[in-house]
């Protein structure tokens, strides 16, 4: 990393850390350009040298919360025996952490800004590579996926041979899976359920497994 990149990383970190502090103390709704600039110690003009707008900055700050999920993945995958066990291990980890912070995860993966991220996820991990932890190469396409549909699709593709899935069924399976997840995340976000995090995770995984069962003869625990 050259001096220019180090400087960029340092300056971005000041603003990202300011946003994270505001989220922890006042909530994501309390974030404003003025608050962030004052807390970071730089004016708004400097902020716009590194971020397109406030939403762009909030997205980068929200990505920091994914670190808990990313660094937890190896624990959830430690004793998996089959590709399908790995798939649901990843989802179990993702559900647990996202249901713990529904506002953050909804903003990253389903907010209107999330559909125009271009290469922001890859850019983020290029600037802050330590946030990826020590991940195996076969997980990187999922972790660096442009959106949640791409991320899940990248794993499902590996099951075409293992589970005798038909390629033409992948898009339907992918969409149904994301709809189930998004539905539970929305219910938690809007306080429309009294499920605990563990109960919501188990319920979501149950329906995801039903989808795979309906398309294969695979035995799934």
Image (cartoon, rainbow, N blue to C red):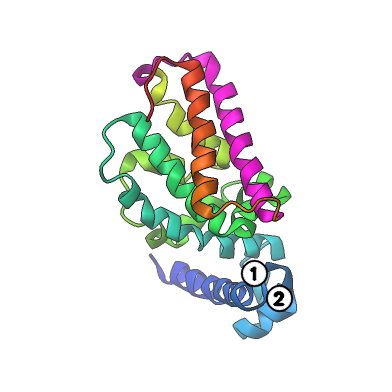
Q: Which residue lies furthest to the front in this view?
A: 194
Mark 1 falls on what kind of element? loop
Which residue in the structure is indicated by mark 1? 49
CA gap, disc 1 to disc 2? 7 Å
Residue nearest the viewer, comparing 107 with 119: 107
Residue nearest the viewer, comparing 55 with 50: 55
* Residue at horizontal 51 percent and vertical 62 percent from the top: 65
Residue nearest the viewer, comparing 48 with 210: 210
Can the viewer see residue 112?
A: yes
- Quarter the N terminus occupies: bottom left
* Residue at horizontal 51 percent and vertical 46 percent from the top: 201
Residue nearest the viewer, comparing 14 with 192: 192
- Residue 174 part of the magenta-drawn span: yes
* Residue at horizontal 57 percent and vertical 71 percent from the top: 16
Please provide percent x and percent y for residue 135.
33, 49
Can the viewer see residue 117?
A: no
Q: Residues within 10 Å of mark 1 (few under 14, many from 20)?
A: few
Please provide percent x and percent y for residue 139.
37, 41
- How many numbered circles are shown? 2
Please provide percent x and percent y for residue 81.
26, 33
Q: Residue 45 carries which label?
A: 2
Magenta part of the chain: 161-190
Q: Are marks 1 and 2 in contact (CB under 8 Å)?
A: yes
Q: Residues within 10 Å of mark 2 (few under 14, many from 20)?
A: few
Mark 2 falls on what kind of element? helix
Magenta span: predominant SS is helix
Would you say 174 lies left or right of 67 here? right
Would you say 2 lies left or right of 146 here? left
* Residue at horizontal 54 percent and vertical 36 percent from the top: 150
């Amino acid at each position: 990393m050259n001096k220019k990149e180090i400087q960029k990383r340092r300056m971005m970190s000041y603003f990202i850390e300011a946003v994270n502090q505001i989220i922890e103390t006042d909530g994501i709704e309390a974030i404003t350009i003025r608050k962030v600039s004052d807390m970071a110690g730089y004016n708004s003009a400097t902020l716009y040298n590194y971020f397109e707008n406030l939403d762009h900055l909030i997205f980068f700050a929200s990505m920091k919360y994914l670190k808990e999920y990313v660094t937890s993945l190896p624990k959830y995958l430690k004793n998996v025996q089959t590709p399908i066990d790995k798939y649901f291990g990843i989802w179990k980890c993702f559900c647990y952490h996202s249901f713990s912070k529904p506002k953050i995860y909804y903003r990253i993966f389903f907010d209107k800004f999330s559909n125009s991220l271009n290469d922001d996820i890859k850019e983020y991990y290029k600037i802050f590579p330590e946030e990826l932890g020590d991940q195996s190469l076969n997980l990187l396409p999922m972790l660096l996926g442009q959106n949640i549909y791409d991320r899940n699709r990248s794993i499902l593709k590996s099951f075409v041979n293992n589970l005798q899935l038909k390629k033409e069924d992948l898009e339907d399976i992918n969409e149904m899976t994301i709809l189930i997840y998004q539905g539970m995340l929305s219910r938690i976000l809007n306080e429309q359920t009294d499920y605990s995090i563990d109960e919501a995770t188990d319920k979501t995984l149950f329906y995801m497994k039903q989808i795979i069962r309906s398309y294969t003869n695979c035995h799934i625990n």
